[in-house]
Image (cartoon, rainbow, N blue to C red):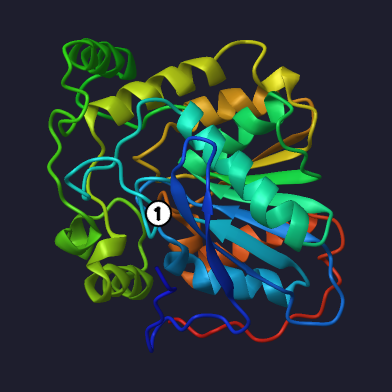
Amino acid sequence: MELVGLESNPVPNGAVSGIITTADRVSLRTAYWRPTGRRSRGTVCLLQGRAEQIEKYFETVEDLRRRGFAVATFDWRGQGGSDRRLGNPRKGHVDSFVEYDRDLEAFMQEVVLPDCPPPYYVLAHSTGGLVALRAVRQGRCRFARLVLIAPLAGLGPMRVSQVTAARIASFLTALGLGEIYSPGTRGTSIEEVPFEKNLLTSDPLRYARNVGIVTAAPALAIGRPTVGWLHAACEAMDEAAAPDFGASIREPVLLVAAMLDRVVSLRAIERLAGELRAGGQVVLTGARHEVLMERNAIREQFWAAFDAFIPGTQDNELLPDRVYT
């Protein structure tokens, strides 16, 4: 599926898009860009969260290219322009996060290593952050540094505890009901949620832009997760909660948490930050879950933290940002 550009969200110039195949024969949509200037500072691997797509990050791609980075990204299986597992393409589903591990492995082997300049960095959001941590801990991917926004270290406030949710998901999955929507959720995607009720961003313009993407290209959208996805996520979060998980990661990691996040757990992110060998945590006041989709004032705080953490970006002269007010 080709990249979808809108007047309010054009495809950044120079995109090279394509399809790769994972070890278990799943087709993934990929894209990469060279830096805007002549000098390259390496490549940022941009890893999405659940239910996102490449198009949602066009603005971020431009931000990174202005900083002198090549950018490579892809759609996880089950979302965006990649293969869907179930007959209902709106259901977000995997049986295990090992499937996401395979996606990242294929992306690195087929796109990043052969086509993109080193050193390699990660900028990941939510689910993408947890998958990136799994990869470096297991030694399957080598990154110079990682910046993880609202990583899925634990679930945010819910009507039931994460422990209870995990038990329910495990029980229903064992009964063969892993492909139904998670209890208490419906098959809604972003275009069906009014801005006033969204948990993702306080910026109405960027929210409207993201709604416009899936309105123009409905095939890119997915809805709520399945019971099976929740079961897989809880198992992966339990692994990340083990005492030796953070301590076994040698690469420098910056965790960026959103103070008003109700999707992932701030406490779990704080615990993980305290266990890391190198790196730390930044908490952005006033931010909701999707920091890169937030108001300019919040995004500027994020980019200041990014530039301070990633070598070589602080003194880089940037072109003007696209204007969102």
How many numbered tags mark residues here?
1
Is the residue 245 above or below the residue 55 in the image? above
Residue 294 at least partly seen? no
Which of the 4 image quarters holds residue 228?
top left
Residue 13 appears at what percent x and percent y? 60, 84
Q: Tell me if mark 1 has few (under 14), some (14-19) or many (20+) residues whose alpha carbon lies within 10 angstroms of its own.
A: many
Task: In this rendered view, identify the residue nearer to me: 33 or 191.
Answer: 33
Q: Quadrant of the C terminus?
A: bottom left
Q: Is residue 43 left or right of residue 200?
A: right
Residue 265 appears at what percent x and percent y? 43, 31
Is the residue 236 above or below the residue 62 in the image? above
Q: Quadrant of the N terminus?
A: bottom left
**At x 69% / y 46%, what residue is drawn?**
109
Task: In this rendered view, identify the residue nearer to me: 7 or 315.
Answer: 7
**At x 25% / y 76%, what residue is drawn?**
216
Disc 1 marks a residue whose amino acid type is Ser
Single out the residue that lies furthest toward the front.
25
- The residue tagged with tag 1: helix, strand or loop? loop
**At x 75% / y 72%, what residue is drawn?**
67
Residue 145 appears at what percent x and percent y? 77, 45
Is the residue 137 above or below the residue 218 in the image? above
Task: In this rendered view, identify the residue nearer to me: 306 or 229.
Answer: 229
Q: Is residue 14 left or right of residue 258?
A: right
Residue hosting label 1: 82
Residue 56 at least partly seen? yes
Is the residue 192 above or below the residue 136 in the image? below
Residue 139 appears at what percent x and percent y? 74, 27
